[in-house]
Image (cartoon, grey):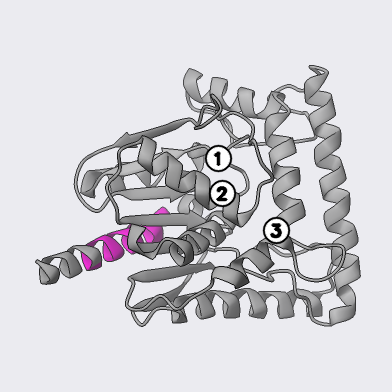
């Protein structure tokens, strides 16, 4: 990946269009394990660890919307994936997926956005609560750096570390993978850098929000499905009234993402948490199938 950097990636299955999975902030391929077999059975699928996450080397540049989408394009090229692709993005991965579609429209055949993040996501009502949000976010970022220091000192184990927790692994390979993530400093440092650019700046919109605003465009008739969790992540320090407003704004942001395409659709997934691909995997599988079939119909009409 340039300058000798390594990015961990794999592709499975066959067929067109290729589906690229873009994970959320947890940065683990294992978050796709309940949807991978079904999607791989219908078309070619590719998975990768972003820089600093999983088995990938740390990033060589600040983690921003532009650097991440540049890396996505480089990964696809290294994998020999022919464009255009369908991108399935979860959480902040959904934000990166839309920025990729904004920047490289010829490379994208469709989008499935799973409880996705979006520009200016932290824009609370009432506005004066922004400073409270900023303080809590900065506290979380400081904790990430503390965990990175513990990892560098060899003081973290897979479980009971107070820094990072995953569902129990199912195999020796999963144990090795998760232990690498949890006990090395790279994930904590990458998540810190990602948070600093994504959530809130000290003054004004975040760096990622500004980058997205500069490239944002309408998506034409691109097949897009946006899935919203019925139980999305709430800022626990907020009052119930503020959390209700946050939920409304979260879903409104998702509907706005779907509306950027004339073929966009928004779906609220019952009985789901933020990781819809784990709590309601069939909803994600169905959305990917719908987008893949839409892309194939468009390809047939063009030929």
Image height check: is 175 above or below 297? above
**Mark sitting earlier along the chain (3/1):** 1
**Classed neighbour count for the residue bearing mark 3: other residues with Cα under 10 Å, few (<14), some (14–19), many (≥20):** many
In the picture, measured across the screen, residue 126 lies left or right of residue 10, that is: right
* CA distance separating discs 3 and 2: 12 Å
Q: Which residues are magenta?
A: 281-294
Q: Residue at x 49, y 27 (%)?
A: 170
**Callout count:** 3
Q: Residue at x 53, y 73 (%)?
A: 216
Q: Residue at x 50, y 31 (%)?
A: 7
Question: Residue 258: horizontal and vertical position, in percent?
Answer: 45, 76
Residue 260 picture quarter: bottom left
**Classed neighbour count for the residue bearing mark 1: other residues with Cα under 10 Å, few (<14), some (14–19), many (≥20):** many
The residue beneath circle 3 is 198
**Mark sitting earlier along the chain (2/1):** 1
* CA distance separating discs 2 and 1: 8 Å
Q: Secondary structure at mark 3?
A: helix
* CA distance separating discs 3 and 1: 15 Å
Question: Residue 300: horizontal and vertical position, in percent?
Answer: 11, 66
**Mark sitting earlier along the chain (3/2):** 2
Q: Which labelled disc corresponds to residue 68?
A: 2
The residue beneath circle 1 is 50
Q: Residue at x 55, y 27 (%)?
A: 5
Q: Which labelled disc corresponds to residue 174?
A: none
Question: Residue 265: horizontal and vertical position, in percent?
Answer: 39, 77
């Amino acid at each position: 990946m340039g300058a000798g950097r390594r990015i961990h990636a794999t592709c499975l299955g066959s067929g067109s269009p290729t589906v690229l999975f873009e994970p959320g902030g947890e940065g683990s391929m294992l978050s796709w394990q309940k949807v991978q077999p079904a999607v791989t059975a219908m078309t070619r699928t590719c998975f990768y660890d972003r820089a600093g996450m999983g088995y990938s080397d740390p990033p060589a540049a600040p983690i921003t919307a532009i650097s991440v989408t540049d890396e996505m394009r480089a990964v696809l090229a290294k994998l020999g994936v022919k464009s255009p692709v369908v991108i399935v993005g979860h959480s902040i991965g959904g934000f990166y997926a839309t920025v990729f579609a904004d920047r490289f429209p010829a490379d994208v055949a469709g989008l499935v956005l799973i409880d996705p993040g979006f520009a200016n996501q932290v824009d609370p009502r009432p506005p004066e609560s922004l400073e409270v949000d900023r303080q809590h976010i900065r506290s979380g970022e400081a904790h990430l750096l503390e965990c990175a220091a513990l990892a560098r000192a060899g003081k973290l184990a897979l479980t009971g570390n107070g820094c990072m927790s995953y569902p129990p692994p199912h195999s020796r390979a999963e144990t090795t993978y998760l232990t690498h993530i949890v006990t090395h400093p790279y994930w904590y440092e990458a998540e810190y850098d990602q948070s600093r650019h994504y959530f809130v700046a000290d003054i004004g919109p975040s760096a990622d929000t500004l980058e997205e605003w500069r490239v944002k465009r309408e998506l034409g008739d691109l097949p897009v499905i946006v899935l919203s969790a019925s139980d999305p992540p709430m800022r626990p320090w907020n009052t119930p009234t503020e959390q209700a407003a946050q939920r409304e704004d979260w879903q409104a942001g998702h509907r706005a993402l779907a509306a950027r395409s004339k073929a966009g659709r928004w779906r609220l997934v019952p009985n789901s948490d933020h990781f819809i691909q784990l709590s309601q995997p069939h909803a994600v599988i169905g959305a990917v199938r719908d987008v893949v079939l839409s892309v194939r119909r468009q390809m047939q009409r063009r030929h």
